[in-house]
Image (tube, rainbow, N blue to C red):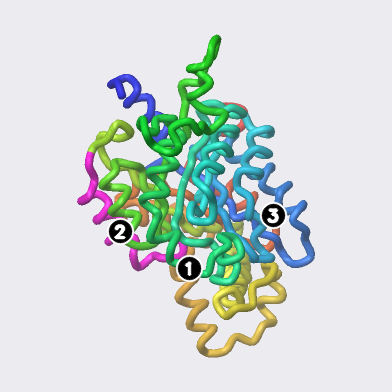
């Protein structure tokens, strides 16, 4: 890859901090469905949130693959991203992530090649190796009982996907004549013209495996701080130590997912995160459901073990007034050295989530609609 191409690839990865933010701010949307709401309601909120994020200068907007969870309507990231691409103009859109072992690499190359054709230069392809669900659902997705097979084969699947995206299988390879379309092969056809963009690959992780792999391959790395906070600093250190410059990046670039919720009053923020924590209690104890309302959470009788879980969980959720959230995010950026913060706000109501991102944008002085 030429030097100019390297700079172009890095430019599609690196963001620029806006306003008073210490690093670029982005959005992770789980398309959460609250009790009494529908998936259609949640998806309408996603459109509203993507538009808000674009107006206010958030750098990118990702959705994550989950399955068999009533309160999370993001089982099909590519479909959701196509919908969001039709309702936005500038913000980067991507997967945070697609769980590669659940899919044939060719299918992912085709899906994200199609997204790239819809929104040229705006698509990210974040990849994880976990199933994004329970073991039984993973078996149904993968049509296999060997659930470790996909994770063990992740580096090989990643290499295959990269080959499909670049259309560069070597001569003699059984896939040499197979092409992901839309993709580079169209430029080699008579009269063919192909977009210069290719979705940048990101590796996602909540432990050291993907951190090391991302570093070794010179790829950007996204760490799931929002549910694996104790591993954040070790994983980022491992990524930086393992990093080797590549045609994509000449130095490491790491973002972290952060649970954060701002409200006009601290008490209201506590009510909202309690409801989200109750949803996690139910998920972790095999009772996944819709996100409960704050009223339901306040009336719920937590066992001592559940209360300990809630306290531990919410200790890693940055929440409170806008100033408190800004202070917490500033501290997290400084403590981890993350190059970007990707904020996820889990709450029962879409209006609460929208308000939270608006308040955070205001706290950092991000661009207003008139100046964006």
Q: Do the residues labelled 1 and 3 touch (CB within 8 Å)?
A: no
The reply to whether residue 170 is in sight is yes
Question: Residue at left 35%, top 62%?
Answer: 207
| CA distance separating discs 1 and 3 | 38 Å
Which of pointers 1 and 3 indicates the residue nearer the eye? 1
Q: Name the residue under label 2.
A: 235
What residue is at 57 percent from the left and 89 percent from the top?
A: 303
Q: Where is residue 363 in the image (x, y as percent from the top left)?
A: 50, 46
> Label 2 crowding class (10 Å Cα cut-off): few <14, some 14-19, many 20+?
many
Provide the residue designation for mark 3. 350
Measuring 29% from the left and 43% from the top, which residue is drawn there?
Answer: 217
The quadrant where residue 244 appears: top left
Q: In this view, does 259 lie to the left or right of 173?
A: right
- Of the 4 image quadrants, the one containing the N terminus is top left
Q: In this view, does 78 lie to the left or right of 299?
A: left
Q: What element carries label 3?
A: helix
Q: Residue 311 carries which label?
A: none
């Amino acid at each position: 890859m030429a030097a100019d191409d390297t700079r172009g690839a890095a430019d599609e990865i690196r963001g620029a901090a806006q306003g008073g933010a210490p690093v670029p701010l982005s959005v992770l949307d789980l398309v959460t469905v609250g009790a009494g709401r529908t998936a259609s309601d949640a998806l309408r909120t996603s459109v509203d949130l993507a538009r808000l994020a674009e107006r206010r200068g958030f750098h990118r907007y990702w959705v994550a693959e989950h399955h068999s969870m009533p309160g999370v309507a993001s089982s099909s990231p590519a479909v959701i991203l196509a919908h969001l691409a039709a309702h936005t103009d500038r913000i980067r859109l991507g997967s945070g992530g697609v769980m590669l072992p659940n899919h044939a690499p060719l299918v992912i190359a085709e899906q994200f090649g199609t997204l790239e054709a819809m929104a040229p230069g705006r698509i990210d392809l974040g990849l994880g190796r976990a199933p994004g669900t329970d073991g039984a659902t993973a078996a149904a997705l993968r049509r296999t009982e060997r659930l470790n097979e996909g994770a063990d084969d992740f580096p090989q699947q990643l290499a295959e996907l990269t080959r499909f995206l670049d259309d560069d299988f070597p001569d003699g390879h059984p896939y040499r004549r197979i092409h992901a379309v839309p993709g580079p092969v169209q430029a080699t056809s008579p009269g063919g013209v192909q977009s210069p963009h290719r979705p940048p690959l990101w590796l996602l992780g909540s432990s050291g495996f993907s951190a090391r792999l991302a570093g070794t391959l010179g790829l950007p790395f996204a760490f799931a701080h929002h549910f694996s906070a104790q591993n954040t600093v070790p994983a980022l250190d491992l990524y930086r130590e393992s990093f080797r410059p590549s045609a994509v990046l000449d130095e490491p670039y790491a973002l972290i997912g952060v649970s954060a919720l701002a409200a006009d009053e601290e008490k209201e923020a506590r009510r909202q995160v309690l409801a989200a924590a109750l949803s996690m209690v139910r998920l972790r104890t095999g009772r996944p459901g819709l996100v409960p309302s704050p009223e339901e959470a306040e009336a719920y009788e937590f066992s001592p073990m559940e209360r300990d879980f809630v306290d531990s969980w919410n200790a890693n959720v940055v929440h409170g007034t806008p100033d408190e959230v800004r202070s917490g995010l500033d501290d997290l950026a400084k403590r981890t050295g993350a190059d970007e913060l990707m904020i996820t706000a889990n709450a029962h109501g879409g209006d609460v989530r929208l308000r939270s991102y608006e308040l955070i944008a205001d706290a950092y002085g991000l661009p207003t609609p008139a100046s964006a």
